[in-house]
Image (cartoon, grey):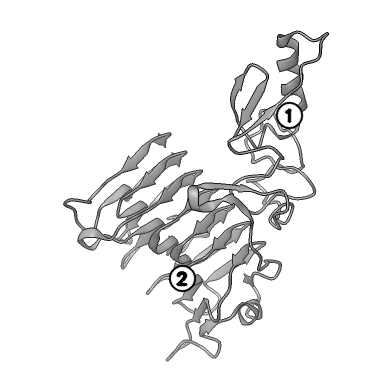
Amino acid sequence: MIIKGNKFHDIGVTYGTTDSHAISGQGSSNILIEDNEIYNTGTGVTFYCYHVNQSIKNITVTNNWIHDTHSNWGANSRGIELVGGAGQGPGTVGDVYGNIVGPNVSSVGYRYIWEEAGEFYNNICYDCGTSFEFSHHIYPVNVVMKNSISLSPRQSHLIYRCNDVLGSCSLDSDYNIFYPISGNQFFFYEYIEGGGGPDWGWKNFTQWQSLSRNGSTFDTHSIVADPLFVDAENGDFNLKSDSPAIDAGAIVPGYHCSTSGAHSGEKCKGWLGSAPDIGAYEYSGNIGETTAQVTEQEDLPSEGLISTILSWFRGFLTANTIKEITGYFLRIR
């Protein structure tokens, strides 16, 4: 099933329940959720797994924007959550790429509590209660998070909780941006018989990084800096030219193209420069809703001019989609 290019809004506002979700499923498989805008709902996207004989497989959530969620009628006000109860079947896993959650999401932006290693790449969370939460009250949790941005959380940047024997959980979190950091905004818990282990509790960023251990990385190469979005408050999460996110990410095998530039026909995320950017959008100069004027050459007909423009931009066409060409103006997003 493919759910693509839709707007979901005003769900559970006048009357609703705790399940006022825009997109949800239980025991679901083989679903792609892509290029949707979701707002004024309880939770944007949520999938549940509640039984040991129930598996959720091949769930991909990519390139969606979820913002302005609510808590009416006990709704959760979350962004994207892949969650479960007392049981989950083998192979339960989901992948979350290139999404934006926020602003105005009062609970958790991204939540994952499944045992199989979930992949979270190039996501943005802005103005959420907690940006990222990876934990389960019974089962172990395994997550890889790379090239993501947590901006202005109301409470915390990241919560990681392992509730099974040591070594069964893992978090590979690196090449991310967290900003700003005020006090202890990272939570760590590892199961040890009779308690949470010697390192459990709320940590500042330096303490959080020091927790890296065999099988887990706690943001060794991540940075604390304003990502410099064009206008996050009004929904423009493109990067400014001086953003510290540019060329600061990591190449993720199987997700990013292996080299910079155009990769026509390849099913991979294109990137420019010396490394992929951190965040949902690759910086490539005049992007976003920017209109650039091109001076016409006297000896070049309009058809040839358009062809020349397209050729000039071919280096980043894999990272951006041409939105509109009108006359001698090129608008890209």
Q: Nearer the viewer, residue 145 or 167?
A: 145
Residue 2 sits above or below residue 112 on the image: above
User: The residue tagged with tag 2: helix, strand or loop?
Assistant: loop
Name the residue: 67% across, 61% down: 175
Image coordinates of residue 223 in percent, x first then y, are 68, 67
Who's the residue at 71% across and 10% down the image?
A: 303
Q: Residue at x 59, y 67 (%)?
A: 179
- Left or right: residue 275 compared with residue 202: right
Which residue in the rendered view is the most extreme toward the left?
15
Q: Position of residue 78 (x, y in %)?
A: 37, 59
Residue position marked by numbered label 2 in the rendering? 140
Q: Quadrant of the C terminus?
A: top right
Residue 279 visible in image: no
Tell me if residue 236 can be seen.
Answer: yes
Mark 1 residue type = Phe
For disc 1, the marked residue is 313
Return the disc, 2 or 1, that comes first in the chain's sequence: 2
Relative to 24, say whether 321 is above or below: above
Which residue occupies the foreground of this view, 184 or 231?
Answer: 231
